[in-house]
Every structure is written in structure tokens, then in C-alpha cells.
């Protein structure tokens, strides 16, 4: 359908809690999801939250096959996740480098739970309930943070581990976040 502009850090919408989705399987929801998928693909993203394209709804999409920005990451199945709920499994966290389409050109070292359970719905209202770990868990946590108005720089513990990708990782092609 359409590649939409991605809001950037500083836009007030990115700092708000998104609204619950109440209607599933609608043409409006399908159009939004198509636009989100087109936008994520065009920008080579691992995921995208509806607020990033200016829609304050609790919807994220994510999926990774092979991505130059994450060359060592395992595959993550393409998923539409509506009204998600995340619960950590255990307390173990792991630091990992993250980028974001709303914070282009930058990376930061972010702690995330290593194992999580996420629940929610697909676009038709079908139940989703998965236990995941590692990169898959990181992607879900990152995207779902957007639904609560949290951008990854807010989670960085030491800002010495935050900077421009080209400076932090010279010579690596990490895309334009």
C-alpha cells in the first residue's frame, strides 16, 4: 500500500502510551498493517510499532530473516502482535546493541530480559502466546516499549555506550537504522 514516514525521537507521540485496539479484522486495520509491513521492509527494519508511523494503537510487527544490520541474529518469524503483554521468564538480563528507525544512525547498549513470554492477538483476534529468548525476546521488548512511550535510549545504563553507528562500528554497514 504505502511506505509511511517514521517519526523521530523528539516527536511527542513517541512518548505517549498507545491506545488498545478494540476491533479486529477490519479493513482499516489491514491497511495499517500493510503500510507498517511496507515501511519496515523499505527501511530494512527488524520491527515496527504503530506509533512510529503516527498511529497511537497498541500494534507491533516484527520479523527477521537475514538482516545486514543484525548479521549474527537468529531468524524471528514475521508476527503481527496486537495489545501485547510481556512477562519476563526469570531475572536474567543481557546487554545488546540496539538501533531504531526512530533514532536513525545511532546505536546503544541496552539491557533486556533474556527470556520472556509474550501474549496478545493477531490481526483477526486470534490468541498468541509464546515463550522466546535471545534476539527474538530483545526485538519484542524493543517494539513493545514503543507502545508505552519508551525509546531504547531511555533504557541505556551508561551513555558512554550510545553513539553514532559509524563511529561505534567503523567500517560496518549497519544500514540507516
Image: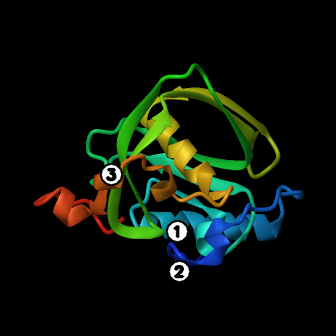
Q: CA distance from mark 2 to mark 1?
A: 11 Å
Secondary structure state at the residue bearing disc 1: helix
Badge nearest the viewer, 2 or 1? 2
Relative to 43, say whether 11 is above or below. Answer: below
Residue 164: x and y in percent read 27, 66
Question: CB atoms at circles 2 and 1 under 8 Å apart?
Answer: no
- Is there any visible trace of residue 114 in the rendered image? yes
Q: Is residue 102 left or right of residue 30?
A: left
First in sequence: mark 1 vs mark 3 = 1
Residue 20 in the image: x percent, y percent? 83, 56
With 144 as the anchor, is 138 left or right in this view?
left
**Which residue is identified by label 1?**
38
Identify the element where label 3 is drawn: loop
Q: Is 164 left, or right, of 141 in this rendering? A: left
Q: Which mark is residue 83?
A: none
Residue shown at the point (49%, 48%) measured from the top left? 63
Question: Would you name the residue on which mark 3 appears?
Answer: 67
Label 2 or label 3, whichever comes before in sequence order: 2
Residue 123: horizontal and vertical position, in percent?
Answer: 75, 52
Where residue 173 sits: x, y (%)? 19, 61
As drawn, 158 above or below 29? above
Q: Which residue is mark 2?
A: 5
Amino acid at each position: 500500500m504505502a511506505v509511511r514516514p517514521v517519526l523521530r525521537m523528539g516527536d511527542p507521540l513517541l512518548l505517549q502510551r498507545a491506545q488498545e485496539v478494540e476491533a479486529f479484522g477490519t479493513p482499516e486495520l489491514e491497511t495499517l498493517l500493510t503500510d507498517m509491513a511496507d515501511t519496515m521492509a523499505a527501511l530494512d527494519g527488524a520491527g515496527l510499532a504503530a506509533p512510529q508511523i503516527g498511529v497511537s494503537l497498541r500494534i507491533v510487527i516484527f520479523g527477521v530473516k537475514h538482516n545486514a544490520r543484525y548479521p549474527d541474529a537468529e531468524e524471528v518469524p514475521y508476527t503481527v502482535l496486537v495489545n501485547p503483554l510481556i512477562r519476563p521468564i526469570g531475572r536474567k538480563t543481557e546487554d545488546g546493541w540496539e538501533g531504531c528507525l526512530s533514532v536513525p544512525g545511532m546505536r546503544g547498549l541496552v539491557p533486556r530480559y533474556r527470556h520472556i513470554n509474550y501474549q496478545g492477538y493477531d490481526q483477526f483476534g486470534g490468541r498468541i502466546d509464546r515463550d522466546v529468548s535471545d534476539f527474538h525476546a530483545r526485538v519484542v521488548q524493543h517494539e513493545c516499549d514503543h507502545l508505552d512511550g519508551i525509546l531504547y535510549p531511555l533504557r541505556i545504563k551508561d551513555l558512554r555506550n550510545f553513539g553514532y553507528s559509524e563511529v561505534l562500528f567503523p567500517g560496518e554497514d549497519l544500514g540507516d537504522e
